[in-house]
Every structure is written in structure tokens, then in C-alpha cells.
Image (cartoon, rainbow, N blue to C red):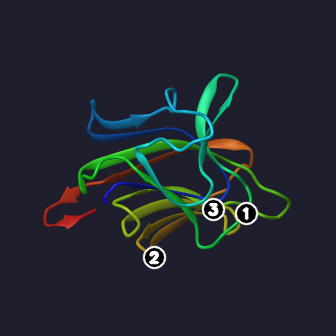
Amino acid sequence: MKNLLLALAIGSICCSTFCAEPGKTLYENSFDKAELNKVPEDMLVLDGGFSVKEDAGNKFIELPGSPVAEPFFGDLFGPTEAVDLGASCRIFGTNKGRRYPIFGLGLNGVGGYKLQISPGKKQLELFKGEDRISGKDFEWTPNSWTQFRLEVKKSGAAID
């Protein structure tokens, strides 16, 4: 599967969108029609207790803060296109004492690209499979929504 990988340690995701080009949405899920306490049928949980929850009339998919596992919990969903694709989502993360989540958004499945926040390292990191490609200093704010956007584009013979 060459679709989105949602990698979370603790948190909630509100809405996810895949676009092949501006104005052309391939997949979108705001969880409005999803059944509570279940995972939508178009999602494949790799690991973790994901389920749809609701707060103040807003639905989202949640991963509880425990139990904690390594290396990550994951949920695959979205289209199977490999290039010229973008994804965006909002993720709400919480901390417990000195324990911080590592969370992010990925494209092209488990071995593809992953943009993640690592609050313990104070880094925003980009990975290709298990390999770290890049990192940038980033100060994460607990108990807040973080907006992610990731694009995979083909330029010449390579995928950027």
C-alpha cells in the first residue's frame, strides 16, 4: 500500500486530505459519518487502539495515551498514488509529566516519507523509511493542535 501512514504516540487526528493537484481531492475524512468507538472501514490499523471519538459535536480519530509501544503506532489510509501527492492533517498531542509523544504524517506507506515532531529532541524531522533525511529545531506546545502538510513530487527521474 502506498498510502498515508499516521504515526502517533499519543493524540488525536481531526481531518485528513489527499490532493494530487490543487483543487483535486483524492481522499478526505473529517470523521463526520464515522461510527463512534470504531475505526472507519477505509483505514488499516498497523498497531494501537485507534477509534473514533466525539467532543462538542466534533468527531476525530484518537489513539489513547497508554499503553505505549515502540517504535510507533500506525494507521494507514488514503489513495495508493506514489508521486505528485500531498497530504495534510491536524494532530492534537498531549504529554504526561516528562513523557512526550512522537507524532507525524507520512506518504507512500511504512517505507515512504514521514514528517514527524519529536518533542524530546525538540526537532521536526523528515524520514525516508527508517533513515532520517533532515531535521530542524522545533519547539512543540503540548495540548495543542499541530497542522501537518507533506508532499511527494516527481522531478525528473527522482522522487523529491
The Cα–Cα distance between marks 1 and 2, rounded to whole angstroms, is 23 Å
Q: Amino acid at mark 1?
A: Pro
User: What secondary structure is marked by label 3?
Assistant: loop
Tags 1 and 3 touching, CB below 8 Å: no
**Residue drawn at 62 percent across, 58 percent down:** 138
User: What secondary structure is marked by label 1?
Assistant: loop
Residue 133 is labelled as none
Depth order, front residue of 3/150: 3
Where in the figure is residue 124, as x and y percent of width and height?
A: 56, 61
Where in the figure is residue 54, as x and y percent of width and height?
A: 66, 31
| Quadrant assignment for the N terminus | bottom left
Q: Residues within 10 Å of mark 2 (few under 14, many from 20)?
A: few
In the picture provided, is 135 more to the left or to the right than 83?
A: right
**Residue drawn at 37 percent across, 62 percent down:** 109
Q: Earlier in the sequence, mark 1 or mark 2?
A: 1
Residue 97 visible to the viewer: yes
Q: Residue furthest bottom?
A: 131
Q: Residue furthest right?
A: 97
Q: Nearer the viewer, mark 1 or mark 2?
A: 1
Depth order, front residue of 112/139: 112
Q: Amino acid at mark 2?
A: Glu
**Residue drawn at 28 percent across, 62 percent down:** 160
**Which residue is under mark 1?**
67
User: What secondary structure is marked by label 2?
Assistant: loop
Residue 130 is labelled as 2
Residue 102 is labelled as 3
Q: Earlier in the sequence, mark 1 or mark 3?
A: 1
The Cα–Cα distance between marks 1 and 3, rounded to whole angstroms, is 14 Å
Q: How many marks?
A: 3
**Residue drawn at 68 percent across, 60 percent down:** 101
In the picture provided, is 93 more to the left or to the right than 150?
A: right
Q: Earlier in the sequence, mark 3 or mark 2?
A: 3
